[in-house]
């Protein structure tokens, strides 16, 4: 491969946003017929780099070359015209339209008078779908497909044009194993045709299975490129985070108190069925599974956002019905939601107001809000959780992810809950803050809170949990204690391969 | 039947079912309550209804594509009035008056061009400023209406051309000129929205704007074209209506935007964009006109009519929401 010219080469790309240097001199090259992995933590600059490549952002410095020629990407249309195809991580689909229209979005085949050539469209689409071996046809409405199938529609876009380079951004995040096999076949076909492939993923096993070389970004800086066969997971991880990955189990156990929450045979339609578990005071129970396994839905049910179709919820041994979040909060249940910015915070409000939001009704002096009491609460939890802000007047939207998450946690702690449910507590948070949040969760358990942690990151569940509940498509596959759990058994359980029986 | 199939069928056919219900109700109620002797479902009466639907209906066709696109246009009533003034006033201009009846096509052309430009201006503002279409067109609604009043104060603008009136009052195959224009506008927009790339892109943009941008669809110019279309149709509606009446009050066309939006929403277009159809809108227009006419037929006054239509709109949207909830396990709001 040394004598061929790179199909796509980035040279010293710099991109700054106000206050942030998102990309700092990133260079790498993709050869024809190569699968080139791009790795880095959340916020390392992968998405920004791809946006520069796709013409959505213009670089402040550096150049993009295709072959020998320097190119300027003025927009997505131009990138596509030059043969660069993006397979986006967030589903970039219009749900009301058909599969065919989505695959050929922006370039529907035309007849006279700008009419859509439906016949050609359907033929071309069905040919692609056949290659992908999917069970739906060109005229299916995308909104009627499962998430995995929607992802396959997204992938089908790579096959529409004569691509020179295809960029896959986390394509397997929601795929099942069978579909992954098809995806890898597609990738090897593209590879055989001499297409350059950039493959972004967090999943090491995939990276080592299908890629030829790996480039790593850290905090917007290029950390180097290594040939995949000559490296291993540990070294790549080290390049990504600058130190070794902490895969240690949680070894410390606290004195466990009474059972704070018990769930018996809980079901909610098709979302999850027959869920039973208990959480004791002083215990952290991790919920691990793939996206869509039903974990978030359980949390939402416990917080009164969904009505269960069967089963019981017992708090401190007493059966309760939770009809709304107001009920749940009154019973001492708190939910730190998955989408911090959308569901957990009012980004435009200041730190203090966000923290006292659930109890502002009670913090009154006569008809007015008692500002002093609010500030006192804020100060207390700022110190306790070590929230770094310029002051309570700072707008939450301006804080870092880690500090935002602490505000959400502080908000619920100030309500003195007995059960704290945390959904994806460290999504989009940098490594340093991650371990702080982990420590915080352990600390809360030590103080006697019952904590449920829902996470899709294995190191995280291993690190914080006393027990781990593995879920697969709406069922609990197995419950592990932190002593008996191994990575292999955990992965098997969440893939539905658990040998220990479904009713574990 | 599959779960969801019933609600889907109900949704797609709902507006037509509603129309049938209205017809039955007013026919029966008319027997007892009407002051006139003629039956409600008289053929002549229905043709008249189609003709009376034309002004709102023609604009509603444009509103469908704008709303499917994820925008809204509140300025159509004011655009309608401006186009009407241009139509009537231009025929009194010296060089136009000198042309005799040949001035008519020019007057039409001027009115249509002005309407299109006003619409395009809305689109340009939405595109270039990035301000929400609701705000932009709220501003232009006030602004355009201001222009109407600047033109002739509180006085009506009149010009009666009998050739024009004859044309507007003519009937072809028993259907009035205005009705033909409504049918033509419906047909043209149906073609545009279901058969052409532009129309399909309108759905894509309204459904998932980011996806459309990523796919290389030029969203700004696309929206501007749609605003130009609705401006054109607002002017066309004025042209058809005022060719017959020959006199425009500065207040004419007020609240048209609301009637139009009501018709479009009743016809099943999603207010957030991405879904809707011209045929559904046509049903919505007919349903509203039936309701106005039917309530008049059984002796209700205008204020009652408005109250009833308002209640029905809310009831329909509530029903739609209920039908769309995916069963009991859905997330509560």
Image (spheres, coloured by chain):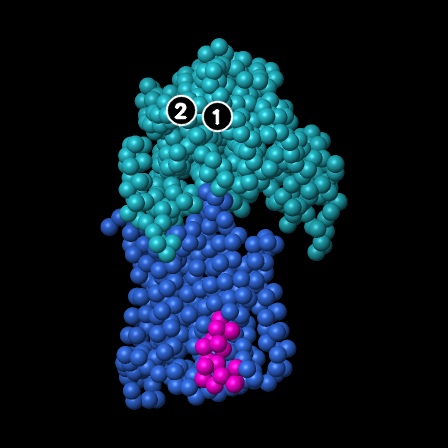
Chain colours: A cyan, B blue
- The chain ID associated with circle 2 is A
- Verify whether residue A223 appears in magenta: no
Question: Does the residue at mark 1 contact the one at mark 2 (Cβ under 8 Å)?
Answer: yes
- The chain ID associated with circle 1 is A
Q: Nearer the viewer, residue A148 or A154?
A: A154
- Verify whether residue B97 appears in magenta: yes
Which residue occupies 46% across, 38% down? A81
Instruction: Give x and y (percent) for residue B249.
Output: 54, 82
Q: Is residue A271 visible?
A: no
Give the residue at mark 1: A7
Give the residue at mark 2: A194
- Which region of the structure is painted magenta? B96-112
Which residue occupies 42% across, 32% down? A163
Instruction: Give x and y (percent) for residue A223.
Output: 59, 19
In-image side of A111 versus A435 (left or right): left
Instruction: Give x and y (percent) for residue A365.
Output: 72, 51
- In which image quadrant can residue A403 be found? top right
Q: Nearer the viewer, residue B326 or A359?
A: B326
In-image side of B1 versus A74 (left or right): left
Question: Quick one: which residue is furthest to the left in this view?
Answer: B1
Q: Nearer the viewer, residue B36 or B89?
A: B89
């Amino acid at each position: 491969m040394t004598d061929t010219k790179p199909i796509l080469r980035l040279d010293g790309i710099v991109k700054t946003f106000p206050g942030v240097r998102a990309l700092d001199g990133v260079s790498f090259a993709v050869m024809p017929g190569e699968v080139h992995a791009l790795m880095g933590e959340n916020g390392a600059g992968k998405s920004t780099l791809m946006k520069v490549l796709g013409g959505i952002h213009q670089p402040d410095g550096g150049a993009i070359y295709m072959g020998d020629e320097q190119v300027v990407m003025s927009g997505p249309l131009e990138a596509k015209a030059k043969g660069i195809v993006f397979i986006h991580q967030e589903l970039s689909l219009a749900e009301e339209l058909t599969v065919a229209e989505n695959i050929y979005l922006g370039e529907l085949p035309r007849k006279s008078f700008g009419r859509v050539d439906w016949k050609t469209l359907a033929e071309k689409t069905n040919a692609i779908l056949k290659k992908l071996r999917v069970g739906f046809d060109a005229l299916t409405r995308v909104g009627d497909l499962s998430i995995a199938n929607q992802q396959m529609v997204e992938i089908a876009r790579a096959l529409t044009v004569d691509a020179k380079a295809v960029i896959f951004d986390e394509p397997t995040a929601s795929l099942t194993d069978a579909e992954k096999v098809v995806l890898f076949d597609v990738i090897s076909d593209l590879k055989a045709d001499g297409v350059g492939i950039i493959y972004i993923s967090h999943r090491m096993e995939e990276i080592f299975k299908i890629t030829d070389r790996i480039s790593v970004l850290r905090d917007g800086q290029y950390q180097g490129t290594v040939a995949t066969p000559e490296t291993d997971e540990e070294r790549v991880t080290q390049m990504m985070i600058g130190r070794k990955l902490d895969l240690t189990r949680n070894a410390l156990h606290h004195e466990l108190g009474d059972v704070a929450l018990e769930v018996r045979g809980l079901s909610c339609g098709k979302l999850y069925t027959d869920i039973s578990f208990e959480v004791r005071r002083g215990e952290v129970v991790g919920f691990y599974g793939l996206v869509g396994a039903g974990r978030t839905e359980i949390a939402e049910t416990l917080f009164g956002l969904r009505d269960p179709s069967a089963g019981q919820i017992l708090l401190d041994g007493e059966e309760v019905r939770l009809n709304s979040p107001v009920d749940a909060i009154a019973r001492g249940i708190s939910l730190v939601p998955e989408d911090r910015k959308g569901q957990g915070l009012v980004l435009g409000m200041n730190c203090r107001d966000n923290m006292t939001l659930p109890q502002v009704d009670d913090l009154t002096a006569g008809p007015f809000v008692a500002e002093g009491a609010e500030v006192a609460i804020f100060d207390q939890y700022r110190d306790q959780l070590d929230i770094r802000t310029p002051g309570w007047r700072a707008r939450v939207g301006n804080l870092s992810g880690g500090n935002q998450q602490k505000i959400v946690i502080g908000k619920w702690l100030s309500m003195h809950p007995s059960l704290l449910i945390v959904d994806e507590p460290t999504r989009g948070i940098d490594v340093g803050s991650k371990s702080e949040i982990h420590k915080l969760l352990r600390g809360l358990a030590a103080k006697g809170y019952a904590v449920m942690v829902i996470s899709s990151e294995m190191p995280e569940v291993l690190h914080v949990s006393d027990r781990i509940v593995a879920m697969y498509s709406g069922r609990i596959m197995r419950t592990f204690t932190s002593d008996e759990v191994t990575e292999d058994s955990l992965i098997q359980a969440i893939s539905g391969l658990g040998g220990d029986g479904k009713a574990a | 039947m599959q779960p969801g199939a019933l609600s889907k069928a109900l949704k797609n056919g709902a507006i037509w079912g509603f129309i049938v219900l209205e017809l039955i109700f007013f026919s029966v109620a008319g027997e007892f309550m009407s002051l006139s002797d003629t039956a409600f479902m008289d053929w002549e009466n229905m043709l008249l209804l189609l003709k009376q639907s034309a002004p709102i209906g023609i604009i509603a066709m444009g509103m469908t594509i704008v709303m499917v696109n994820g925008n809204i246009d509140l300025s159509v009533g004011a655009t309608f009035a401006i186009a009407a003034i241009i139509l009537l006033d231009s025929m009194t201009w010296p060089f136009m008056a000198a042309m005799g009846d040949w001035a008519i096509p020019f007057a039409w052309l001027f009115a249509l061009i002005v309407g299109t430009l006003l619409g395009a201006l809305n689109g340009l503002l939405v595109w270039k400023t990035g301000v929400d279409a609701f705000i932009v067109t709220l501003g232009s609604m006030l602004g355009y209406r201001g222009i109407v009043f600047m033109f002739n104060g509180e006085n009506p603008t009149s010009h009666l051309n009998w050739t024009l009136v004859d044309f507007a009052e003519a009937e072809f195959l028993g259907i009035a000129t205005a009705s033909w224009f409504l049918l033509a506008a419906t047909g043209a927009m149906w073609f545009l929205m279901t058969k052409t790339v532009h129309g399909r892109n309108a759905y894509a943009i309204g459904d998932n704007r980011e996806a459309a941008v990523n796919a290389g669809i030029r969203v700004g110019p696309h929206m501007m074209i749609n605003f130009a279309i609705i401006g054109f149709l607002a002017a066309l509606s004025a042209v058809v209506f005022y060719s017959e009446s020959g006199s425009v009050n500065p207040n004419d066309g007020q609240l048209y935007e609301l009637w139009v939006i009501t018709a479009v929403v009743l016809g099943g277009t999603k207010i957030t964009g991405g879904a809707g159809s011209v045929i559904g809108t046509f049903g919505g227009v007919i349903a509203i006109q039936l309701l106005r006419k039917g309530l008049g037929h059984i002796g209700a006054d205008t204020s009652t009519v408005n109250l009833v239509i308002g209640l029905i709109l809310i009831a329909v949207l509530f029903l739609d929401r209920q039908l769309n909830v995916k069963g009991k396990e859905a997330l509560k709001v």
